């Protein structure tokens, strides 16, 4: 192998784009060929899941790597699924399979010996087998109860050997299955949150506005009749960039920010003695404390504001969200 071959920049980009084009064509072909076998696959998966079973994905090599990823995607989006390596299955891991499960056997050639050897043991358990393969007439196709074809004309590899287009197409097909099952099972974002309690995804879909808002001494509040000077002192004490104006029942009437103060000062240097209600923004942007924290970002980006008042179901003021606080919650 010649490792010193010089390749010019244009050829580097040309080869990269050609690879992607070949894989795109492969995925498009799989998409265009979707039909009754895929529908039957979805319906069988739903039947198994409804009856308390799970989807067991099984493959070797590159197909095994993709199958393992797909099992994780399925499990995280509401479809009970696991990955079983066929070689390990023959040495005890077959115990993860139960009679109410469904085996999804994945092999593009359909002739992978390690995978084929485990199928009789699965069949003896009464577990249905669905093959996902590019060769319906293969030994895998013949042994299975159902075949979902995955036609790919060529690999991106110049020798047509290294699994490239086939693995990309398999990934897309598996993701399509996961998303269809998600929809059919009416899987909601609250369900997704239960499966992702940590990390960036977990923070995005488990943190609520209430978790991020300022309350108590860190939140400046004023009532009608308060002067702008007094409101500014409350903001300074709370180290907040805004003050919420509320009535006697704590209902939100308005908001006054440091930006509002600067604009008011340009209009009149007597503003410090003015009642806060005369310069506040009436009917301000507010968000319910039960909403997801990610909704704060959408609101801030859309309305171009730095402070958002928080209310409860009755419209009563409960806190303030300051854009400067969001990074520490890793919401942005």
Image (spheres, rainbow, N blue to C red):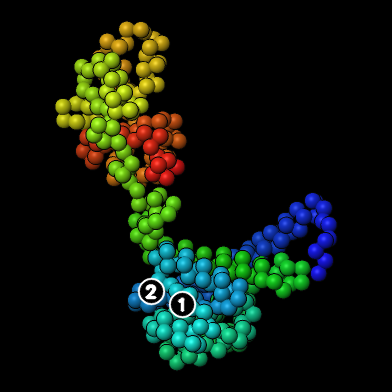
Q: Which mark is residue 56?
A: 1
Q: Residue 29 versus residue 242: which sits nearer the camera?
A: 242
Quote the CA–CA distance across marks 2 and 1: 11 Å
Residue position marked by numbered label 2 in the rendering: 49
Quadrant location of the N terminus? bottom right
Mark 2–mark 1 CB contact (< 8 Å)? no
**Neighbour tally class for label 1: few under 14, some 14-19, many 20 plus, Cα within 10 Å:** many
Across and down, in percent, residue 306 comes to 40, 31
Q: For this view, does 327 lie left or right of residue 18?
A: left
| Direction left: furthest residue | 248
Q: Is residue 303 visible?
A: yes
Residue 50: image quadrant is: bottom left
Across and down, in percent, residue 252 comes to 24, 30
**As drawn, 291 above or below 322:** below
Secondary structure at numbered mark 2: helix
Q: Residue 184 versus residue 13: which sits nearer the camera?
A: 13
Q: For this view, does 27 lie left or right of residue 230?
A: right
**As drawn, 120 above or below 59:** below
**Residue shown at 33%/41% (left/top)?**
212
Residue 309: image quadrant is: top left
Q: Which mark is residue 330?
A: none
Across and down, in percent, residue 98 comes to 39, 83
Q: Residue 31 versus residue 302: which sits nearer the camera?
A: 302
**Residue shown at 72%/56% (left/top)?**
17
Q: Nearer the viewer, mark 2 or mark 1?
A: 1
Mark toward the start of the polypeptide (2 vs 1) = 2
Residue 158: image quadrant is: bottom right
Q: For this view, does 41 lie left or right of residue 207?
A: right
**As drawn, 111 above or below 34:** below
**Residue shown at 47%/65% (left/top)?**
73
Quadrant location of the C terminus? top left
């Amino acid at each position: 192998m010649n490792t010193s071959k010089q390749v010019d920049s244009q050829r580097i980009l040309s080869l990269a784009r050609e690879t992607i084009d070949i894989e795109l064509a492969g995925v498009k072909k799989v998409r265009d060929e979707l039909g009754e076998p895929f529908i039957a696959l979805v319906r069988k998966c739903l039947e198994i899941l409804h009856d308390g079973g799970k989807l067991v994905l099984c493959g070797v090599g590159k197909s095994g790597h993709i199958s393992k990823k797909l099992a994780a995607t399925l499990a995280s989006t509401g479809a009970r699924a696991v990955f079983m390596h066929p070689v390990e299955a023959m040495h005890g891991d077959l115990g993860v399979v139960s009679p109410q499960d469904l085996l999804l056997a994945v092999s593009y050639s359909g002739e992978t010996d390690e995978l084929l050897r485990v199928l009789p043991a699965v069949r003896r358990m009464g577990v249905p087998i669905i093959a996902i393969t590019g060769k319906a007439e293969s030994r895998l196709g013949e042994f299975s109860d159902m075949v979902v074809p995955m036609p790919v004309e060529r690999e991106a590899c110049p020798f047509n050997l290294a699994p490239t287009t086939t693995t990309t197409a398999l990934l897309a097909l598996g993701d399509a299955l996961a998303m269809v099952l998600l929809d059919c099972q009416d899987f909601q974002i609250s369900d997704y949150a239960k499966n992702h309690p940590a990390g960036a995804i977990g923070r995005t879909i488990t943190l609520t506005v209430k978790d991020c808002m300022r309350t108590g001494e860190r939140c400046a509040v004023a009532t009608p009749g308060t002067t702008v000077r007094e409101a500014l002192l409350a903001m300074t004490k709370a180290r907040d960039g805004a003050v919420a104006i509320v009535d006697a029942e704590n209902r939100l009437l308005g908001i006054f920010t440091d930006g509002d103060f600067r604009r008011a000062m340009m209009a009149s240097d007597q503003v410090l003695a003015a009642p806060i209600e005369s310069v506040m923004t009436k009917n301000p942007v507010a968000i319910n404390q039960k909403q997801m924290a990610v909704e704060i970002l959408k609101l801030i980006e859309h309305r171009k504001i730095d402070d958002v008042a928080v209310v409860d179901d009755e419209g009563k003021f409960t806190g303030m969200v300051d854009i400067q606080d969001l990074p520490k919650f890793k919401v942005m």
